[in-house]
Image (cartoon, grey):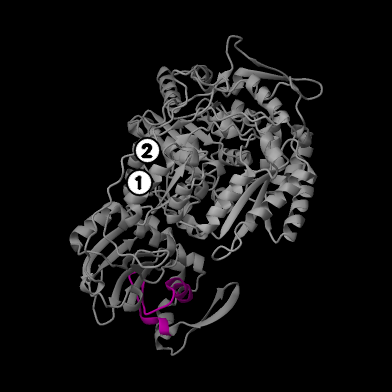
Amino acid sequence: MAHESSLYQLTRPARYLGGELGSISKDWTTVDVTFALAFPDVYEVGMSHIGSAILYRVLNDQPWIAAERAYTPWPDREAQLRAEGKPLTSLETGRSLADFDIVGFSLQYELCYSNVLTMLKLAGLPLRAAERTEKAPLIIVGGPCAFNPEPLADFIDCALIGDGEEAIIELCAAVRASKTAGETRAKLLERLARIEGVYVPSHFTVDYQANGCVSSIKPLDPGQPAVRRRVLADLDTAAYPVRPVVPFLQTIHDRVAVEVARGCTRGCRFCQAGYIYRPVRERSPETVRRLIEQSLQHSGYDEVSLLSLSTGDYSAIETLIQNLMGCYADQRVAVSLPSLRVGSLTPGLMNEIKKVRKTGFTLAPEAGSERLRQVINKGIREEDLLESAKAAFELGWRVIKLYFMIGLPTETDEDLDALVDLAARVKAVGRGTQGGADVNVSVSTFVPKAHTPFQWDAQINTQETLDRQKRLRDALKKKKLRLKWHEADLSFLEGVFARGDRRLGEVLEKAVELGCRFDGWREHFRWDLWQEAFSATGIEPNWYLRQRLPAEIFPWEHIDAGVSRTFLQREKQAALLGKPTPDCRDGACSYCGLCDFETVRPRVTSPQLTASVPAEPQEFPEMGQLPKLRLTISKTSRAASISHLEFMTLIHRAVRRAQLPIRYSAGFHPAPRISFGDALPLGVSSEAELVDLELLEACDPAQTLERLNQALPADVRVRQAEEWPRKAAGPAESLAEAIYQLPIPAEAGNGLDQRLKEFLQSEEVLGTRLKKNRPLTLDLRPWVSDLQQKEGTLSMHMISGSPLFLAAHLLEMEIEEVRSLGICKTAIRLKDVEKSVD
């Protein structure tokens, strides 16, 4: 994608650059189908979603498909696109989303729906499917929210229900065949409807009763069955992105993520994921270890996250963790398990986790009382929770986070009081441990989701949520415990759309028109605008949170998630009786209706894994015996838009990818011994950035240069590598002068010669800049050793200071105007050593 200087004016311009290591850009003339993977949230969130990364790999593995990425632009970028009349484009080739054959949105959260419509509008596409032309891209959605896609039914062409790895290729093949045959859009949709897991909303009609409830959902073709969820039978043989796209900037989950298992059979009755991702399918530990090894090699990350709905339930978790620690401890690779349940925390597993990090420890009892935990089938005993908490404190953890929900079915004030008492007892078991113990309590409001036993239950309203939050906050404060909570208005709106029907499309469209964006972000959520949208469309949102009748037809009734309605009703009854349902992983089948026990069945791996062989200890020379390796690096084009911190991270990861024997600092948090020069301002490129590496063993400079350049993105190059005295000053301290050049705009050229002359002849040149919104007066003269103007170019020889601020002063321009001119550091001179880069 072509670089835009206007990106410098934005918050975190690296979001919009593209060109990251691992990204794939294909020639559109060589492919049959183009697919935009559109994530309806900001880049940092979307790049942390492993499902999108899997589909990016699966699609681009096909030579006839080009898959590219797009994310919701932050409000400042959206405003810029609108002001400049430019469409929303993909990162890989900079093409408008309207140019693709398919635009696929991943729906992870109901509050991202406004972003879906925003992205369509920014692409210049009509929002409603019925208004789009034959040439418009096919708009599809997938992800957990696609299990009730009805609020988006008027805006999408189809939804992919369930696992996408196989179905997405079948969908693309249908689009290719339809293009070849010259079919109409209607004929294409008929093709797609024949693919298992693909739902076409326009092929169904919905009727309503006078009281607003759904009276019927009928397919236009009477012979069409309910749309059944697609299931990937064997996770172990499925494709996985071992060459991940490595962002320039830090994302929400900045690490290698490997999905060790999909699905969960614990049967927590509130958990939608536990029902829509059944059955449990585990990757073998050998496969997991191979994926981790390849992903680390190609990414340069220093952390691995083992993903599943409950990683502690993975059959080989202890042996896998022990094996990974044996393989990667000497490489300073941390291993994290983001999803653990109390029942799976054995002393051995906790001891292994302790070796990795002790920054925080999260336990999720969900409910405070034993009675309520029986209702939701959580299966956690208070004694087990306290025992796990005590072990964590004794092993060195200082803070434990407890996660609960409020508003669960049958919840009473006594259950809330039990929550407070339980949190206090967890803190009490840590008394006397080294360093003390602290507990943070976090609560969210329960949202009854589709395809769960609690889909019939009511959701508490906003006032009830606020009242319960206040009760907990006051009670916990008396126990000297802190409470964090999810905003009541956000939970309310989430519940409306989670349980909503097609009539909400009108509300959504109105809300977007009024300016709703990024509704999942507290700072951007506008409840007043949503209230205006509900009022304007005559829809009462509280109606969607009501208790549903046992025989009521749900808006998602025609979506078959694989788990039968009979089973869910049975689980609902068991909840009222406080009866548990055992985990079918180890016990008897609970007859949920999903498995055929031939293709679709639980797949549990062996807990055994070949032990890792610890590397032979190496003898390294003392630090004083090895010279440093000094690199001269260019940072141009896209890379000029990344911050200094992002540049440092980029180099750190490249060193890991190049497998250089870097030395680490001592202490609790060892860091690679890599030294950098002073930070370049955003928008300033360079041909001469200095970086020093301290190595454990001698490396040939020429070979190091080659290895690093293979590991770096295209716009960052190592131009020179040479041995450097161990005790010599670092890059920042050794710099005597830097030469910056920039083109002189025509309007700034008049009188510039005189201004340069006066500057050099002055003993003091005062300039004012803002620092933390306060004016700060600086003497610019000591910054400069020489200034030259030649053939429309200004050369600034600087000893210190900001080239942006100096150029703005000399050219009598605003800093942001100067930033877009393209300043480049073209040469440097070191103290006592002449060194320049042409």
Are there few (<14), some (14-19), or many (20+) residues within 10 Å of tag 2?
many
- In which quadrant is the C terminus drawn? bottom left
Report if the CB atoms under discs 2 and 1 are less than 8 Å apart.
yes
Disc 1 marks which residue?
323
Confirm whether residue 579 shows in the render. Answer: yes
Instruction: Give the extent of the magenta segment.
Output: 782-810
Instruction: List x then y, in percent, for residue 177.
Output: 41, 20
Q: Quadrant of residue 239?
A: top left
Are there few (<14), some (14-19), or many (20+) residues within 10 Å of tag 1?
many
Instruction: List x then y, in percent, for residue 477.
Output: 73, 59
Relative depth, front residue between 337 and 11: 337
Instruction: List x then y, in percent, for residue 706.
Output: 22, 56
Report the side of 89 relative to 579 (left or right): left
**Of label 2 and label 1, which has the lower sequence position?**
2
Could you give the CA–CA distance between mark 2 and mark 1, rounded to whole angstroms? 10 Å
803 part of magenta stretch? yes
Vertical order, 87 against 833 (above or below): above
Report the side of 368 relative to 280 (left or right): right
Please state which amino acid type lies under the numbered disc 2. Answer: Pro
Vertical order, 59 against 328 (above or below): above
Confirm whether residue 509 shows in the render. Answer: no
The dot on residue 285 is 2
Vertical order, 289 against 544 (above or below): below
Report the side of 706 relative to 764 (left or right): left
